Image (cartoon, helix red, strand yellow):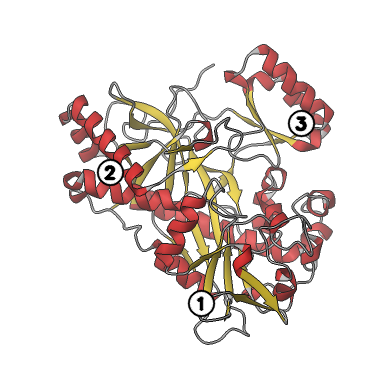
Amino acid sequence: MTVSAFDEMTGSGADVRQGYERVKTWIGETEVEQLRARQHEAELLFRRIGITFSVYGDAEAEERIIPFDIVPRVLTRAEWDRLSAGLVQRVKALNAFLGDIYGKGEVVRAGVIPEDLVYGNPYYRPEMAGVAVPHGVYVPIAGIDIVRVDADTFYVLEDNARTPSGVSYMLENREVMMRLLPDLCQTHRIAPVENYPDELLATLRSLAPASAPGFPTVALLTPGPFNSAYYEHSFLADKLGVELVEGSDLFVSENVVYMRTTQGPRRVDVLYRRLDDDFLDPLVFRPDSVLGVPGLLSAYRAGNIALANAVGTGVADDKAVYTYMPEIVRFYLGEEPILQNVPTWRCREPDALTYVLENMADLVVKEVSGSGGYGMLVGPKSDVATIAAFRDKVKANPTNYIAQPTLALSTCPTFVGEGVAPRHVDLRPFVLTGSDRIRIVPGGLTRVALKEGSLVVNSSQGGGTKDTWVVD
């Protein structure tokens, strides 16, 4: 039985939903040729600005532009306030969970989550056990992926607690909309997003260790220009007004991190790192890494630098750990979760495994450490041979997989070349946790599956992005 998707502009019928009234009128009054011309102008703007990404494994590793859709996604203030409260709650629980598993481990001892899921997790870093993270904040920057199924129900699809990406697209999407469609923008009271760099910088500075001087120095660590997200790294460093550095630009002396400058060494107090744990410090992790900084972890353990995000946060990204988040929220906060998880079967459990193997054609099956739309099977969209091959993989290593129902993700009106049509979307709001408070810029990055019927929104799989409006 096919469940029709909830459309965020029209709901379940033909009536326009609150917030979308003027957008629907604009769509109805604008010729397809005008929309196509605006779409082309947007593409030219993105090319001129240089917003590109590359996909690892491409034969030519060519740089691409993420397709941008000129029809905005609209959330009302009431919808956003409910989402925002749930995001704050979830990120508080994530930080408490990470502090606990690298400390006393009470959540494991209480039987809330299996021990092997935590301490046997490939992203658990025993080197972090007992390390006093500055201000106890493990996840200063979180990207929480949200999907919607009806007017009132939002689900958390996954938590991104390592190095969440995409915020540059959120900012540039708004800039392009203001340039191309100023009249439409001016007819709405749209909550601003352009203050995100200021909020991020304030968050990072608030996390400076006690040993830092009064005005802490922040730098952004990148793997370099060959990384698929290098554009975003350079964009954010420029917006923050901080130095963009590679591992070779830094060195450690007496457990303090310094940056090489033309005026001589300069101490770094906070490092916003866009580099995976494995490559951070060749003295501790991968010895063949030329991207990291020898001695960085020693400086971290000594309390002389803050890392955003902390080392070892990947445990919270794990899709099997995700399934325990409702219990984790209750355990640490004593509250019922405001945002629910997608119902999930853990293939590590025999009864769940039996169900998943028998019903794989109707489910979405994911690797617990997969990301970017890879390592997953969308049963209803797959042929018999693909399902059979995936079934064999799950049988061979059931602990490596979870399964979820195929949700009827909400749709938004999207310009697809021949006109405006509904396409499935998700939302990645960015949650900033400092030592002083939690900050969330209203909206986030809406990703859209541009292929008709597709549920995969990832840019590496052909998805695009939209500007996200929170309107009064």
Residue that label 2 marks: 19
In the image as oriented, which residue stretches furthest toward the top? Answer: 384
Q: Quadrant of the N terminus?
A: top right
Q: Residue at x 47, y 69 (%)?
A: 242
Residue that label 1 marks: 262
What amino acid is at disc 2? Gly
Distance of label 1 from label 2 (alpha carbons): 52 Å
- Comparing 83 with 141, the one in front is 141
Q: Helix, strand or loop at disc 2?
A: loop
What percent of the width, then of the height, locates residue 105? 80, 63
Assess whether mark 2 and mark 1 are in contact (beta carbons under 8 angstroms).
no
Assess whether mark 1 and mark 3 are in contact (beta carbons under 8 angstroms).
no
What amino acid is at disc 3? Ala
What amino acid is at disc 1? Thr
Of marks 1 and 2, which one's residue comes earlier in the chain?
Answer: 2
Task: Say above or below: 266 vs 128.
Answer: below
Task: Say above or below: 423 vs 246.
Answer: above
Residue that label 3 marks: 352
Distance of label 3 from label 2 (alpha carbons): 41 Å
